[in-house]
Amino acid sequence: MCGRFALAATPEEVAEFLGLLETEDFPARFNIAPTQPILVVIAGDRQQQGSNLPERKALLVRWGFTPSWVKDPRDFPLLINARAETAIGKASFKAAMRHRRILIPASGFYEWHRPPKESGEPSQAYWIRPKNGGVVALAGLMETWSSADGSEVDTGAILTTRANARIADIHDRMPVVIRPEDFTRWLDCKTQEPRDVAELMVPASEDYFEAIAVSDKVNKVANTGADLQAPVSVAARPAAKPKEPRADRQLSLF
């Protein structure tokens, strides 16, 4: 599960990292939550000048994937994540896996370690970011939902995979990270079928992220300041082994 993330990089940093010709100005956001607009990158219809590669462009979509065949989103679960292991064949995501793969720029994401209730230990929030800082590109899927009156809403979800050994101590799932050298392949939905990019949907290397314990302020959507990422002290826990995949856990619209 990836239920909160942040994007504190400047528009210029995002444009350079993702190879965008231009992007609109946007503020730093430290607590991006489901149903809010998120910045995504897609392959454009035109080729880059002097190159045979397609242009990349940025746009905003609603975080919460709605398949095109849904009649009323109020009667459909809010899909903020898609499991990489099953997205290719799952009815909700298979069309987007084939035609609408996206990149979601982030500075990092939040995750919660939730001990068994009988342990008596409280939940602990973590800010998980690249060790070397900068922007990370999360794999995502996009779909445009059309209402009966003709209005359209662009929606998106983050792909997740099993956690690597570093993150498994906190949670058994983590977002799929796409490396810069794989951006073109991932976004190329014309020549690269889902089976051709399946190898990209794997856990990041164990030394890619660092996890920083933070306060429970991040639990409240109304808290949006940079202080959400201030470290706090917690008791050390023994490292855990990655767990077996579990059934989907999606948030509800209500």
Image (cartoon, rainbow, N blue to C red):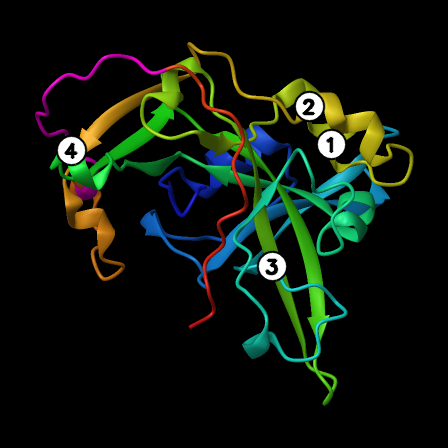
Q: Nearer the viewer, mark 3 or mark 4?
A: 4
Where residue 173 appears, x then y in whole percent?
Answer: 47, 32
Is residue 25 covered in magenta?
no
Q: Nearer the viewer, residue 97 or 188?
A: 97
Q: Residue at x 71, y 65 (%)?
A: 144
Q: Which mark is residue 119?
A: 4
Amino acid type, mark 2: Leu
Residue 11 visible in rendering: yes
Three-letter residue code for mark 1: Trp
Q: CA distance from mark 1 to mark 3?
A: 19 Å
User: Which region of the structure is painted magenta?
Assistant: 228-240
From the image, which quarter does the C terminus lie in?
bottom left
Figure check: 71 above or below 117: below
Q: Is residue 160 above or below residue 31?
A: above
Q: Nearer the viewer, mark 4 or mark 1?
A: 4
The answer to which of marks 1 and 3 sits earlier in the sequence is: 3
Counting every numbered tag in the picture gives 4
Classify 25 as above or below 199: below
Q: Which residue is mark 1?
A: 186
Is 15 situated left or right of 191 in this image?
Answer: left
Q: Nearer the viewer, mark 4 or mark 2?
A: 4
**Label 3: element kind:** loop
The outermost residue toward the front is 118
Helix, strand or loop at mark 1: helix
**Element class at badge 2:** helix
Q: Main secondary structure of the magenta part?
A: loop
1 and 2 marks in contact (CB < 8 Å) = yes
10 Å crowding of disc 1: few (<14), some (14-19), many (20+): many
Q: Is residue 155 above or below residue 135?
A: below
Question: Which residue corresponds to mark 3?
Answer: 65
Q: Secondary structure at mark 4?
A: helix
